[in-house]
Image: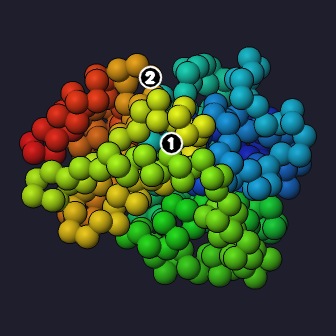
Amino acid sequence: MLRQIKDRIEKGNRFLITTHIDLDGDAVGSCFSLYWALVSYKKEAFVYLKDRIPYKYRFLPGPKDPRYLINTLPGERFDTVFVLDCGDFHRVGQGYENLKNNGFIVSIDHHSTNSGFGDINLVDEDASSTAEIVYDLFRYLGIDISYEMAINIYTAILTDTGSFRYENTTSKAFTICGHLTRIGVRPSFIATMVYESHPKERFILLGKVLNTLETHKDGKIAMAHITRDMCNDSDALEEFTDGFVEYIKEIDGIDIAILIRQTEDKRYKLSMRSKGDVDVASICRIFGGGGHKKAAGCHINGDIGTVKSMVLEAIKG
């Protein structure tokens, strides 16, 4: 597969790079690092992001020319479309169907639930992150990793391993990050930008969310929720909720942490984390979602009471 991808890059001229909606550090970092790699090949590369980049990742170096960072799918054809960190094609967002007609699809991903939608599927569920796979691709291609590529890859690995706390943290992840620091990446700077530069409205909202905390199944399941009214009352954007589920996960004695966030009337997004042996990806797949065994998500329609009952019943089953 690496050979095939190399052939696509060497023979092509115009490329599109995209990822899933609800952007995280791995999605942004993987896309931007691949962009800089293609630029080093003297190729024309566009990054298509359906959603706005979250505030904590806006320090990452992406395309300097705004023409190459787009949020509307262009009509023209590309030699290859790279879809990164995306377990299913529809996760690219509205209009994803058009990409099939826009070019040859290469999926690079580390989700165990990847549906194999690409013409080439480079999937390694044992990788710490998609950025780790992208790093391996760069090494195979013989690319000299620039600072712009390095800081994006480091940030992606850092965030997808939960600051090297999750079970997907491997010796290889540390080895890669060690190499990136020798290129010039400063871990303290990235930690400050990602974890210590939040707007105060985030903490006002967090207080409201923690007041909704409840436990079930003899304290093994902890759950909290966010409504749009709570966000409005706190003057908080939806992106400010990123990472809230991790606070719930920190409760001693629980096996599953669940954060339920309202996205529309009668529609909620669930973020689930597992501390025990429960495979939360299998639970989220019941509702059309997916992810990893220890971290997954999905959407459920209904009022908040119905959504809670549905997910608790799915866990019980």
Question: Looking at numbered disc 2 in the image, what kind of residue is underneath it?
Answer: Glu
Q: Which residue is mark 2?
A: 264
Across and down, in percent, residue 181 comes to: 72, 79
> Badge 1, how many Cα within 10 Å: few under 14, some, many 20+?
many
> Looking at the image, which is closer to me, 50 or 238?
238
Q: Which residue is mark 1?
A: 86
> Badge 2, how many Cα within 10 Å: few under 14, some, many 20+?
few
Q: Residue at x 90, y 40 (%)?
A: 65
Q: Is residue 188 left or right of residue 174?
A: right
> Looking at the image, which is closer to me, 5 or 14?
14
Across and down, in percent, residue 99 comes to: 61, 25
Q: Secondary structure at mark 2?
A: strand
Q: How many marks?
A: 2
Across and down, in percent, residue 68 comes to: 83, 36
Label for residue 40?
A: none
> Looking at the image, which is closer to me, 247 or 179?
247
Q: Is residue 65 left or right of residue 313?
A: right
Question: Looking at numbered disc 1 in the image, what kind of residue is underneath it?
Answer: Cys
